[in-house]
Amino acid sequence: MIGSACSGIGGFERGLEMAGWGPVAWQIEPDPWCKQVLARHWPGVRIYDDVRFVSPRGLAPIDVLCAGFPCQGNSSAGKGEGLADPRSALWFSVRDLAAAIRPPRVLIENVASGAARWLPHVRRDLHLLGYRTRAIHVSAFDVGAPHRRRRVFVCAADPDRVVLREPEQWRPAGRPANRLRDGRKPESGDAGACGALADADAVRELRERGDEHAGWRWSRNGGRWSIVPPISGVADGVSRRLDGRVLEERCRMLGNAVVPQCAAAVARAFDLWAPWVV
């Protein structure tokens, strides 16, 4: 059973379902647009409004708590305030929820570009709660998407309730792209046609280097895709009949979402490390 905090549009829990970790017991998300998406894809699942105020006593028992807490304070595209940013500070509410309900497993996701601003603090907090943790770096490119979207997933397991394997027994060899991707290469050509989403970290990195192709990222097969796709009134896969506000919200929700295939790959790696609950 999955419990989700900072659910967004449910990309995290969708990936965990793909890995066989479902079903979803409950979700926590205040955004009204996101809640409409959640209600459509998980009808009948209870959605709570705010992780800061939800009562642990009313939550159904779960096997894993997942949360992709807001990244604005951590990302290199922001001001770099880390967990002091009020949005990214929601981590502390997620931590308190984990402490209250004590699930056997916890999965946390956030940006890789600002990992130093959040990763040591999150792992420390989980260790103080008695969890053992592993951090897995994975990007959307690793699972076949035509953009980078680098993220870090923290896998936390309660050693009193989860059987753990030693690193040499579970850690795959090679680079993430070699072990997580399914052999497909990203499509070259127009970014809109392949559904690319913005990668603000890559744009900043290239522009700081003075790269004349700051809007492009080269793929391994010689093609290229746009880091910031040319969206002018319509996004690939979004009806042209949608008004500007709906389009804006759709792009915002997609931009904040966890890539389900990344979450699924991390869950399978988690199963190699902590294969079953006692």
Image (cartoon, grey):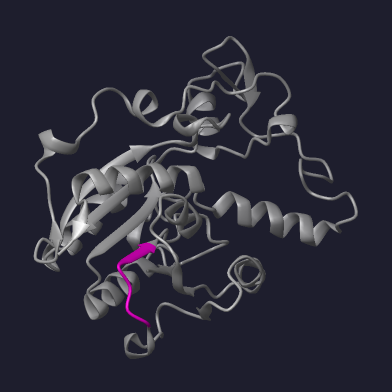
Which quadrant would residue 165 be assigned to in this image? top left
Above or below for 243 versus 190: below
Which quadrant would residue 25 be assigned to in this image? bottom left
Q: Kindly identify the residue that appears in the image at 53 percent across and 61 percent down.
A: 10
Residue 242 appears at what percent x and percent y?
86, 57
Q: Kindly identify the residue that appears in the image at 34 percent across and 29 percent down.
A: 176
Residue 3 placement, left or right of 46: left
Q: Is residue 128 visible?
A: yes
Q: Is residue 265 magenta?
A: no
Q: Furthest residue to the right?
A: 241
Residue 92 appears at what percent x and percent y?
30, 70
Residue 28 appears at what percent x and percent y?
47, 74
Q: Is residue 76 visible?
A: no
Residue 276 appears at what percent x and percent y?
21, 57
Q: Kindly identify the residue that appears in the image at 42 percent across and 47 percent down.
A: 264
Q: Kindly identify the residue that appears in the image at 54 percent across and 26 percent down.
A: 207
Span colored in magenta: 60-66
**Quadrant of the frame with the C terminus:** bottom left
Above or below for 161 versus 252: below
